[in-house]
Amino acid sequence: MSQEKGAKKGEERPELAPPRGTNDLLPPESWRWSFVTRLAMDTFAGAGYAPVDTPAFEHTEIFERGVGAASEVVGKQMYTFTDRGGRSLTLRPELTAPVMRAVLAGNLHRSRLPVKLAYAGPMFRQERPQRGRHRQFFQVGIEAIGSAEPAVDAEVIEVGASFLEAAGVRASLLLNSIGHVDPACRTGYLKLLVEYLEARRDELAAADVERIAANPLRTFDSKETKTREVMQGAPLISDHLCDACATHLESVLAILDELGVAFEVEPRLVRGLDYYTRTAFEFTSPDLGAQDAVGGGGRYDGLAAALGGDELPGIGFALGIDRILLAAGDQGDETAGGTLDAYVVAIGDAARRAALGLATRLRRAGLAVDLDLMGRSVRGQMRDAARSRARSAVILGDAEIAAQAATVRDLGTGEERSVALGDLEGRLLP
Ligand code: AMP
């Protein structure tokens, strides 16, 4: 998790620092992380996407077949290990292939279609760590499996845009179609692209020359200035889509217009993973640095067959929580949770004995309540109450116990009032 704020992790005790590229997720940042993750799953559930989770590791071939051996993720970034039984396993670098595997394994596609699933969890890629790029990072995402209708593309994209807005992220939506594997569509186009790139081999950055044979579409993703200049003149997939793919794209754009979702068609947008077909999209934020992609997704009509299952179209996206929190900045801190309704302050032995009972009673009524568990003095308890960010202090002393009433102090304004112990539940609500 991102720790851009505050002391650098492990600075004082390097032997206790987490592995390079990973972060401990600590309060108060963890409150925002937990709030945004819940907001995502709630937003997705509101559109009919049920929670799903799969193991943190899979058989390596799930990613080799489902993501593609030529992709950067599989070729260069996977945490692959051999277990004690000699099996090759890999920590999941993404969740689309595992979710599709799970759908096929569980025969979910034989019941109600489309199968709509939502996830939140850690992914693992051995990348060079930098701001917004870690080796363990969190993603939330959805997958809609079993429909090739353009309405599903539009729904998935709209749900992503709605969630980002609710999370306080300023995001632009970039959209393209990368066609499908067919001589009259992407396959034919790739020939033209490879010819174009071969003719300009010497003008490309060295790292991109390799891509001509392995993954030519990815040359559009190059960050190298030399390559980017070459790509300005490259043939574009949008000019070489087959009629069916072109019509599909037109329909998706028309539905998004109707839904009021703002987008920009970006003919140079491609996705790095092999199984993507047709719709490809990305959310970027101007509030991030070099790593400005908040997330992206697309259609993957070829994935189920690549995994050895039935032909099953699908579309989904994955958004990075780390970058969502960076892009949202301090927005939403107030609603991110971590605020307590009350802090019970106990004065004297009788009150100390009664304090945990009172806190428990209030908690059972649904209030968020904390109290001193360190034997602090009254001043110490008041200081701790302020630090705890509780809205009110419920002060309990001998006089209060005798009167069966507590003194409730508003920790914002300092105002005090006496509240009968039996009425506390109702009176402590905001
Ligand atoms: P991808 O699965 O590569 O399309 O990534 C989707 C989103 O996940 C990105 O836009 C990022 O927000 C996030 N993401 C991917 N890789 C990383 C990483 N190494 N560190 C942090 N976030 C990442």
Image (tube, rainbow, N blue to C red):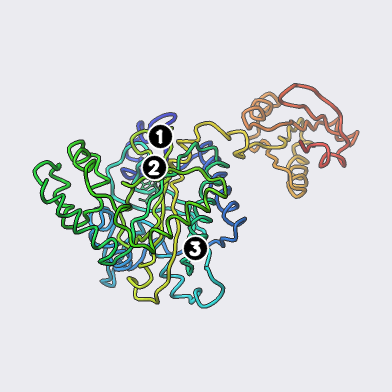
First in sequence: mark 2 vs mark 3 = 3
From the viewer's perspective, is residue 1 above or below residue 400? below
Where is mark 2, residue-wise? 293
Name the residue rendered at 29%, 65% in the picture: 181
Q: Secondary structure at mark 2?
A: strand
Where is mark 1, residue-wise? 288
Q: Amino acid at mark 2?
A: Ala
Name the residue rendered at 35%, 39% in the picture: 291
Q: Are marks 2 and 1 in contact (CB under 8 Å)?
A: yes
The yes-or-no answer for disc 2 within 8 Å of ligand 1 is yes
From the viewer's perspective, is residue 320 above or below residue 83? above
Residue 144 circle label = 3
In terms of depth relative to the viewer, which is nearer, 22 or 363?
22
Which image quarter holds the N terminus? Answer: top left
Label 2, label 3: how many angstroms apart (C-alpha)? Answer: 22 Å
The yes-or-no answer for disc 3 within 8 Å of ligand 1 is no
Residue sitting at the far top: 414
First in sequence: mark 2 vs mark 1 = 1
